[in-house]
Amino acid sequence: MAFSRRLFAKALVGAGSIPLAGMALDAMRGAGDDAPSAGDRSASAAGRADVTSDSPGEPRNQPAATPDRTYSLDARRAGEGGTPLDSTTQYLYNRRYPAPELRVPAGDTIQVAVENDLPKGTGTTVHWHGVPVPNEMDGVPGVTQDPIPSGESMTYAYEASPPGTYMYHSHVAQQMDRSLFGPLVVEEEEPRLDYDREVVVFVDDYLAATPPTEENPDIPLYDGIVVNGRLPDDPQEVGVTAGERVRFRFINGASAGVFDLRLAGHTLTVTHADGRPVDPVQVDSLRFGSAERYDAVVEFDNPGAWELAATPVNAGDLGDPERGRLVVDYEQSSASPQSPRGSPTRLDRSMLRAVERYGHVRGSPDREYGLTLSPGDDGAWLMGGQRYPDADPLSVSPGDHVRVTMRNESEMYHPMHLHGHFFKVGHAVRDTALVAPGQQVTFDVYADNPGEWFFHCHNQYHLASGMARVVSYDRQA
Ligand code: C2O
Ligand code: CU
């Protein structure tokens, strides 16, 4: 494209509500094109609330005074059990890898007491990835709170809403790559899908060693791709019955891995992206980056033993770890599992159509930001040519319709996550958007949750190397 990266960054970053000069922007509008709102149609039929809020000046998800559900998480160094998954370089919540699932009905107030029993001098926080919590509950050190010092604790509380598949994780340094993470499920009152039971599938790039932590750390060499805490040579077996319908909640808990997920012998009916319901779409495989989630229903109609494979797309960057596995076994089958074969139909962003209404982003935006995603000097990773923390905040006002265009000028994937909000990307509504090498992605977001919100690449090494900004609400409404 015929415009310079610097010009692009300069002209758009901080442009406020100034309409953009004709510059290649039209050409830049890709997946995010503001096509007539897809969400509108099924929303009223289903009698669903708007996923955006009606009072943009008020913080979202304020907790009730008395919590409905309380949990406690104790962060501490792993033991010396002698298994590869019990390395002393790991940090665990409640001694579990991944950490226990937190599950709560939508609308309930969840309260989580977090105790920091990590080694002396190691602070920590917990971030509730995807949930539009009030800002002070968001768990971002240096942005929304000071880290909880070792030996101390902090209680987080917020209304668990809207329903969906989420995750929680530490937001300090590379603690997520030391395994401080787990699934968070907010249950619908009445699931609109028909299924017999659920299986949560948590995928991670497993690192037995201490993650690199210098200023611009490189992605480390991983020891394997782990599915539900099991290395590929010792996969979890899930027994199924012919005729059964299972709702899978796939969570990418990896710090750097981008995976193609595929279940041999079966079709995935994708029903949710990042927890938000979509019109069901049938595919053989889906690709997801760090912190993205998909729900998919599988109808088990093909007896045998089958492999669910998580194949790293960016294997070269990860040190070529073996692909992750889980085995699905029909009752009484003793066959060794079959691997996926043939060329799959892969989920594409354009196939996702949100069921819920995403309000207030019609027409032209009040603010528009364009950000290149590119490598910098000395291993830095830049957004709009700047390296966080030496980077300008993106300012917004409550009630603004903000449009953000990201252009990936690198050869790596960047799963870009905005805290505290869902956004509309194409016809989908989500909180994380995977931007492929050379690709450009536009999202529209309604500024309905005042505060200071992190916006960054979820690859923990790109984040540590500067690929982040703060979205900052100004005071006047
Ligand atoms: Cu899971 Cu700042 O992110
Ligand atoms: Cu990145």
Image (cartoon, grey):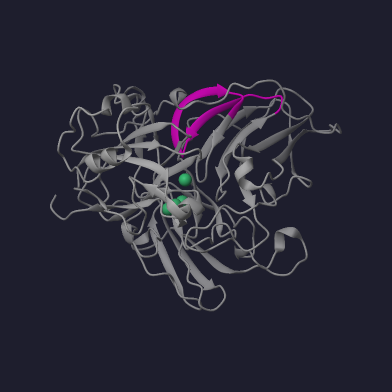
Q: Is residue 181 left or right of residue 189?
A: right
* Residue 111 appears in the picture as rendered: yes
Camera-side residue of 157 and 467: 467
Residue in view at x 73 percent, y 69 percent: 80
When the figure is inspected, residue 127 is found, relative to residue 394, above or below; the finding is: below
Residue in view at x 34 percent, y 38 percent: 423
Q: Disc count in the image?
A: 0
Q: Which residues are magenta?
A: 264-285
Camera-side residue of 403 and 270: 403
- Looking at the rendering, which quadrant does residue 199 occupy? top right
Residue 89 spot, x, y in % from top left: 64, 66
The answer to if 190 sits in the magenta stretch is no
Work out which quarter of the rendered image holds the N terminus and state it.
top left
Residue 446 spot, x, y in % from top left: 26, 40
* Residue 93 appears in the picture as rendered: no
When the figure is inspected, residue 471 is found, relative to residue 137, above or below; the finding is: above
Residue in view at x 55 percent, y 56 percent: 181
Camera-side residue of 103 and 260: 260
